[in-house]
Every structure is written in structure tokens, then in C-alpha cells.
Image (spheres, helix red, strand yellow):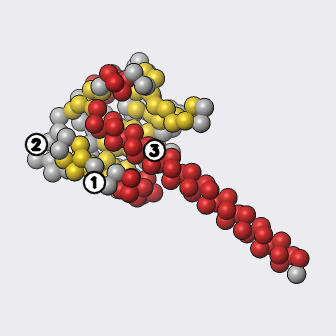
């Protein structure tokens, strides 16, 4: 009887810890989706004249599900904002591409110069791998670094308002 109670107690604690981890990841992705929204608002690049939507893409389904919830009914440059799950084979509809730590290996296999798409990630060597903006944690807070030159090479500029908040990476 005591063993059964201990087992039940252990399972309960494991579920509690797992749900806290899941909540932490969800909160982190919600914050990152908010950052992406603001990068879109304060970034400047040529959008396809035929665009009906502004699209944030990612090959990470978990991120897209959370972004869809947190960015619902938002607009960018008078276009409805949409978050879309994609494979890295077809980026034609993407305005922003978010590469998570779970999808970085796919990115490294496919990465090349992508014009007109802001590429954002969250791994240590992301900017060195061709990305434009990288999230990192500092004192428990999400911060970001930007390579303005790599953005410029992709045909994108970022507002000085955002650049003042970023750690600038010269490449």
C-alpha cells in the first residue's frame, strides 16, 4: 500500500514538473512571437505587391501553434498577420522565418542567402550560420542580438528604435 502511494506521489510530481516545463516553453514562445511581431512592425523591406498576408514561418509546429494563439487578429502594414508551419523547401510566402533550437539542424542543412526574409533564431551560433537576429537569455530575460549588415544584405533594414535595444553584431 505504501509503495502504491509512493508511486502515485512520484507520478504526480513528475506530471507537475512536466507541466511547469511545458508552461515555461509556452510562455517563452509567446514572448518570442511578440518580439517577432515587433520586428515585423519596425523592420523595413519590400513586400510582394500581391501579398494578401504578412507571414511568420517556422518548421517548428509547437512554436506555430503558440504564435497563432498569441498573434491572432494582429496586422502588419495593413496586412493580416499569419503564422505558418513550413518545411524549409519552400519559403516563398514567408516574410519572417523563425528557427528554433529543435529545427536548427534542418536550417544548417538548407541555409543559404535568403533575400527579403528576416531570419530569426535562438541558438548560440545562429548569426554565424547566416541568421539575422538571435534570441538569448540574460539574467532570466529574453534579449536579442542583430547583425544589421546581414539584414541589409537580405534587403531589410531595422528601425533605430529596435537597434538601440539590441546587442549589435558586426559581420
Q: Is residue 100 above or below residue 150?
A: below
Question: Residue drawn 39% across and 21% down?
Answer: 164
Disc 3 on helix, strand or loop? helix
Q: Quadrant of the C terminus?
A: top left
Taking the image as shown, residue 34 lies to the left or right of residue 114, namely: right
Going 43% across and 21% down the picture, which residue do you hit? Answer: 168
Residue 81 horizontal side relative to residue 32, left or right:
left
Residue farthest bottom in this picture: 1
Q: Nearer the viewer, residue 65 or 132?
A: 65
Per the model, the C-alpha gap separating discs 2 and 3 is 30 Å
SS under mark 1:
loop
Residue pictured at 38% horizontal, 57% vertical: 69
Total numbered labels = 3
Residue 7's disc number: none
Is there CB contact under 8 Å for labels 2 and 3?
no
Sooner in the amino-acid sequence: mark 3 or mark 1: 3
Tell me how far mark 2 sits from mark 1, CA to CA: 21 Å
Crowding around mark 1 (Cα neighbors within 10 Å: few <14, some 14 to 19, many 20+) is: few
Mark in the foreground, 2 or 3: 3
Q: In the image shown, does 115 or 3 lie closer to the viewer?
A: 3
Res 90 visible? no
Q: Which residue is mark 1?
A: 73
What residue does disc 2 label? Answer: 49
Q: Look at 14% across and 42% down and name the residue there.
A: 48
Measuring from the top left, give residue 85's x and y in whole percent: 35, 56
Quadrant housing residue 150: top left
Q: Earlier in the sequence, mark 2 or mark 3?
A: 3
Where does the image place residue 116, in percent across and percent down from the top left?
24, 36
Residue beneath disc 3: 31
Q: Secondary structure at mark 2?
A: loop
Amino acid at each position: 500500500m505504501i509503495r502504491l502511494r509512493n508511486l502515485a506521489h512520484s507520478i504526480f510530481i513528475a506530471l507537475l514538473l512536466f507541466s511547469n516545463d511545458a508552461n515555461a516553453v509556452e510562455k517563452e514562445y509567446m514572448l518570442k512571437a511578440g518580439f517577432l511581431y515587433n520586428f515585423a512592425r519596425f523592420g523595413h523591406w519590400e513586400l510582394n505587391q500581391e501579398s494578401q498576408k504578412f507571414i511568420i514561418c517556422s518548421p517548428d509546429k509547437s512554436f506555430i501553434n503558440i504564435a497563432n494563439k498569441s498573434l491572432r487578429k494582429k496586422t502588419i502594414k495593413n496586412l493580416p498577420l499569419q503564422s505558418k508551419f513550413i518545411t524549409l523547401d519552400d519559403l516563398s510566402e514567408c516574410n519572417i522565418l523563425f528557427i528554433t533550437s529543435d529545427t536548427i539542424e534542418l536550417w544548417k542543412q538548407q541555409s543559404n542567402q535568403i533575400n527579403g526574409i528576416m531570419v530569426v533564431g535562438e541558438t548560440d551560433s545562429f548569426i554565424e550560420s547566416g541568421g539575422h537576429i538571435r534570441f538569448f537569455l540574460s539574467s532570466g530575460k529574453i534579449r536579442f542580438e542583430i547583425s544589421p549588415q546581414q539584414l541589409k544584405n537580405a534587403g531589410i533594414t531595422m528601425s533605430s528604435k529596435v537597434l538601440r535595444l539590441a546587442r549589435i553584431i558586426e559581420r
